[in-house]
């Protein structure tokens, strides 16, 4: 039986690989969900009634159901119901399905934060911009956007930190993220079985990642102080 000192490098190597997958899913989700969330928030404020109602119902469904269930539906529904396994059965397919589910889910949450930030800007700024001959798009991007960002950084930071931990849900469709890698040593992996400590060790990865993100987001919030 291997000693702890012999197991440690094996476990760390596996956890490092799993954590890279976790980080990849995290960044892909942010890159996709932030712009999509902004578009959805603008759509919910649209004067086109069918679009506005449809988006609000969609947001209600996504926010009202567990992300785990959404992952299962997105990954298994095409193959089981439509008989078209679009994701395939490999790791790349599981990652793609996870990314789609996470982007849709977090875009809906981000859209509500964006909506709150946009609505918090005084209407007088729109009127002043129109008087100066600016278009509505110019008013939004040149006048309101940076002010909105200042106001949404705290709630957005909370969602981003939650996203880091939520990536662990992707193991429900066997995506080999860091917790999946840690849990594998309980069942048997690379000559190690019945070891629970690697699973607990994954918490350190999350703590370090969220600690760094907290510092970065805190720094961003301080840089936006001049928008008070």
Image (cartoon, rainbow, N blue to C red):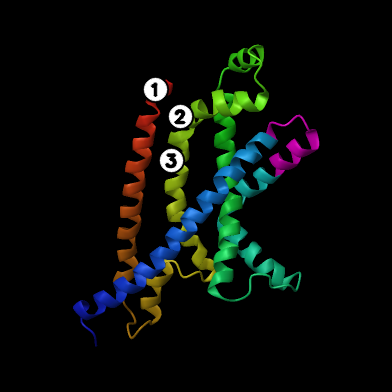
Numbered label attached to residue 127: none
User: Majority secondary structure of the magenta segment?
Assistant: helix
Q: Nearer the viewer, mark 2 or mark 1?
A: 1
Residue located 69% across and 67% down the image: 77
Which element type, helix, strand or loop, lies under badge 1? helix
Which label sits on residue 226?
A: 1
Residue neighbourhood size for the residue with mark 1, other residues' Cα within 10 Å, grouped as few (<14), some (14–19), many (≥20):
few
Residue named by callout 2: 150
218 with respect to 165 (left or right): left
Q: Residue at x 75, y 74 (%)?
A: 83
Q: Is residue 49 above or below residue 211?
A: above
Q: Is residue 135 left or right of residue 99?
A: right
Judging by the rendered image, the residue that carries numbered circle 3 is 157
What span is in magenta? 44-57
Q: Is residue 47 left or right of residue 69?
A: right
* x then y, percent, for residue 178: 40, 66
């Amino acid at each position: 039986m291997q000693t702890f000192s012999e197991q440690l490098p094996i476990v760390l190597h596996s956890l490092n690989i799993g954590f890279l997958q976790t980080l990849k899913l995290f960044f892909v989700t942010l890159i996709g969900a932030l712009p999509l969330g902004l578009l959805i928030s603008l759509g919910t404020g649209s004067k086109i009634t069918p679009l506005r109602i449809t988006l609000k119902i969609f947001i209600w469904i996504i926010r009202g159901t567990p992300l785990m269930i959404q992952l299962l539906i997105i990954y298994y529904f095409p193959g089981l119901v439509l008989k078209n396994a679009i994701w395939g059965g490999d790791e790349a397919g599981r990652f793609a399905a996870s990314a789609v589910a996470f982007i849709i889910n977090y875009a809906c949450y981000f859209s509500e934060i964006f909506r709150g930030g946009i609505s918090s800007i005084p209407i007088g700024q729109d009127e002043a911009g129109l008087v100066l001959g600016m278009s509505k798009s110019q008013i939004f991007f040149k006048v309101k956007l940076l002010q909105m960002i200042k106001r949404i950084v705290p709630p957005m930071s909370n969602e981003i930190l939650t996203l880091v931990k939520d990536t662990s849900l992707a193991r429900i469709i066997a995506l080999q993220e860091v917790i999946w890698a840690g849990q594998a040593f309980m069942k048997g992996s690379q000559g190690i079985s019945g070891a629970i400590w690697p699973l607990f060790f994954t918490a350190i990865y999350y703590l370090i990642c969220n600690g760094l993100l907290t510092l970065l987001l805190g720094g961003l919030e301080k840089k936006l102080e001049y928008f008070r």
